[in-house]
Image (spheres, helix red, strand yellow):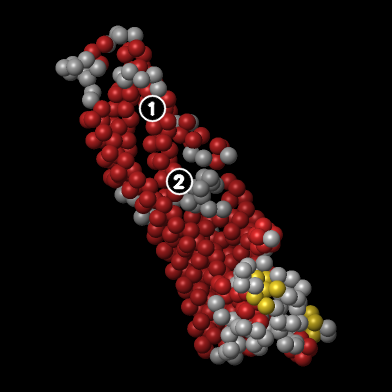
Amino acid sequence: RLAHTVVPQVLGRLEFWGFFALHIVITILFRLDIIPEFQAKGSIVRLDWNDVKVTTAITIFFEVFYTNTCFTRYLKFYEKTRKLLVDVIMVIFDLRLYLKALEPQHARLTARYFLASLLLFFHHVNIKRKVVSLQKWEETLQSKLILPEEQAFLRSIQSSERALIVLHWSTDVFVLGHSKARLPNNIMKAVVEKLQKAFMTMQELEDTLHLPVPFQYFHLLNLMVCVNLVLWAYSMGAAESTFGIVVYFFSELIFMGMMELASMLADPYGDDDVDFPVSSWLQEFFEKAVQLLEYSYTHGSEVDGWDSVLKAQGPLDVTLTGSASHPQENPRTGLLEGGQGWVSANSWKANATVGGRRDGPGHRDGSLGNIDEVDHYSEADDDDDDGDE
């Protein structure tokens, strides 16, 4: 587990060991009385710990602010990335619902171009980061989603524009299929808006990536951290306590670790431990999209038909107890006694009103009531009851 933290990255940096070596040298000089005036009153080289507290407090404030800003940015990237992937399923859902039965080839081509546009977008994001695992996965998937002649055309276009071009192909094919299938205009408007919103999300992600924390702030914060570590190395090295080396080591590790973690959070598209598993997410949602578009449900002699299913559908029954009689609530335990099991009173009340029936003390209007009140029987309820007995 330690390998997946910031500790290996911090310990692998030369700056860390440089500051620590400075602290060790000062400690040795003080312990050997080579420069005894380190802590002598009135000495010009004496450093009061109260003076160090000022720079420490300022550095901690700005470092916490920077880390919080990077984490907020990280959460925004997560929200927008997941939303973009959910938009894939929503578009495929509409294609399956409205277009697949009438114009299956148009639906498939629209979906293929839409998935390819997402792949090209994340490929563009990954170009500067050069993540080898993602590059191999993207190359494999591109060969399935983008034909050789299409790839040849896209190579003549800038990387930042390829996703937009392929997304336009997807929209164009859908409009042609919509016209050929003679679907209502509101369907075209709904699907095209979802495709456009997907591009807006891509653009927002790219704009946020191109707007990092100002370099001037980052540079000033690094300077403050370095100054603070030097002052700590001096003051702790000249301290009487034998634990100064241990305290300095972990203090330096925490300070530099926070900076390292904040830098990772600021750009979550890569191969750091805190980065998003984009390839896994894309694979997951692409498989869902293909399954949703291509599955066929067979019931008897019908394929994707519901006539026989509708005829066979009876009244809903989701009663959990399997009891034909009305159970009674035990005022001591709050459970219903009777039937073939034990359930809480709220659970039975909710179940008794499903389908508009009122078989017990539920809601008279046939609603489910507050689903949050459902409290299914658990072993803990049984244990509590046995304890009472």
Residue occupying image coordinates x 72% and y 87%? 315
- On the picture, is 253 further left or further right than 111? left
Mark 1: secondary structure: helix
117 relative to 234, above or below: below
Q: Which residue is mark 2?
A: 264
* Quadrant of the rendering where the N terminus is positioned: top right
Q: Which residue is mark 1?
A: 248
The percent coordinates of residue 307 (x first, y second) are 75, 90
Marks 2 and 1 sit apart, C-alpha to C-alpha, by 24 Å
Residue occupying image coordinates x 67% and y 62%? 385
Q: Is residue 130 visible?
A: no
* Quadrant of the rendering where the C terminus is positioned: bottom right
Q: Amino acid at mark 2?
A: Met
Nearer the observer: mark 2 or 1; the answer is 1
Of label 2 and label 1, which has the lower sequence position? 1
- On the picture, is 352 further left or further right than 32? right
Mark 2: secondary structure: helix
Q: Depth check: 249 or 383 in front?
A: 383
